[in-house]
Image: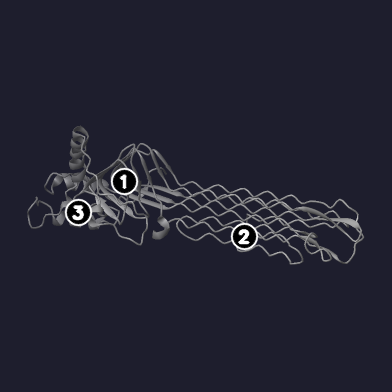
Amino acid sequence: MRTCTRKGRSFAATRTAAAAVVGLLLCAGLNADPVTDDRHDSDHSPPIDSYPPDFWVIDDYQELWRDTTVVGVIVTSTGELNTRGYTLYVEGPLTNHGRITDFYSQYHGGGGFGGSGGNGGYGGYGGFPHYPPCCATEGSIGQGRGGAGGGGGGGGGGAWDTSAPIEGTVDGGDGGDGGNGGDGGGHVRLYAFSFDNQNVIKADGDNGDPGQNGGDGSYGDWFKFLAWRDAASGGGGGGGGGDGGDGGIIEIHCVELINEGDIHASAGLRGLGGDAGASFCANLEHSGKLSQNWEHGGPGQPGGGPCGWAGNGGESDIGTQCGPNQAEDGQPGCDGEPGTVLLIKSCRGDIDGDEDTDQGDLGLLLAAYGACVGDPNWNSDADLNASGCVDQADLGILLADYGCAPRPWHD
């Protein structure tokens, strides 16, 4: 595959060389470790010496800062590679004993950010109407869609007596904020001659956050006009749960599949809705004088998607009725959608890099036929068996692979 021979080395040649290097590294306990950079802000570029060496042993946290080509990769059991939406080309073996994933890929066309949950409405207060809840947002679009935020719960109705503006005021409970949606999974794209995954490669969506609980209503009584009076307010509605983020995309292209391991782009789970705040009832009989006022609760708002509706706020009560419309719980968000895992069998005879083996590759091999390293017409990509010459053996490999096209390893 041309995409895996960016430095003029064929898969076969680098497989042999890389195997020798692996042995030396493991026996000598050496670690060809690139300089790390702890920054995760895509607006900054790493220093030039932070790019990986030809053979990369990863035994801690490492990131890609661009599309990168190396001879071979070993991720140890303590190592983690964050591709950050970039592509890793491995001309020889890729062996993973740790974890390969994609974080911060929103900067590179990866998972969408989850939507923000709506703000809960304020409870009614002393003659002023409740403030409506607001602003649940849709998740942004990336390789894996971010989950939508849950709606904000409605504020509970307040009660008051205009003849007793201080003691005769009872506030409604605030509505709960909606939960944020989970971020979508990223995009992991790997090319290698041989692929041996002994642990995990993932691009999962994050779970949605739960909606917040609505605030409780309250109760108050006071003495006015030679009589006791009281009032009670409604509770706030629960916030809606955020949606889970969609799983991302994992693409792995290889000529030899040694071990598939654990590869997944799972969906994020939905966040639960918040509980309604308690609404209270007045205890005393009231004459229904015009000075006494009550409010309906504010309406709960929809989530940014089809799920995650928030609960309505509860009514207040001045004794003429006992708040028949109580506060409501928020509804859960939706689970995200699972992502895509593509495990593609590559073509060994692909010399021109178009990912198949056809007449174009045969023409390149024949143009270099008989050439060895250093000859004017030498083409390392046509040396399919890494012998140092393009000869009958390479032609046999290409003809045996002729007509190959990329296809799933598991039909």
The type of residue carrying mark 2 is Asn
Residue pictured at 56% horizontal, 61% vertical: 138
Q: Quadrant of the C terminus?
A: top left
Is label 3 or label 2 in front?
2
Q: Residue 324: x percent and y percent?
A: 82, 54
* Element at label 2: loop
Q: Is residue 196 visible?
A: yes
Quadrant of the rendered image containing residue 200: top left
Q: Which mark is residue 7?
A: 3
Q: Is residue 238 left or right of residue 192?
A: right
- Residue farthest to the left? 375
Give the amino acid at mark 3: Lys
Q: Residue 323 versus residue 272: which sits nearer the camera?
A: 323
Amino acid type indicated by mark 1: Cys
Q: Which residue in the structure is indicated by mark 1? A: 254
- The image position of residue 113, as x and y in percent, is 49, 57
Crowd around label 3: few <14 · some 14–19 · many ≥20 (10 Å): some
Question: Does the CB distance between marks 3 and 2 fall below 8 Å?
Answer: no
Closer to the camera, 254 or 124? 124
Q: Image quadrant of residue 78?
A: top left
How is colour applied across the structure in the image? one colour
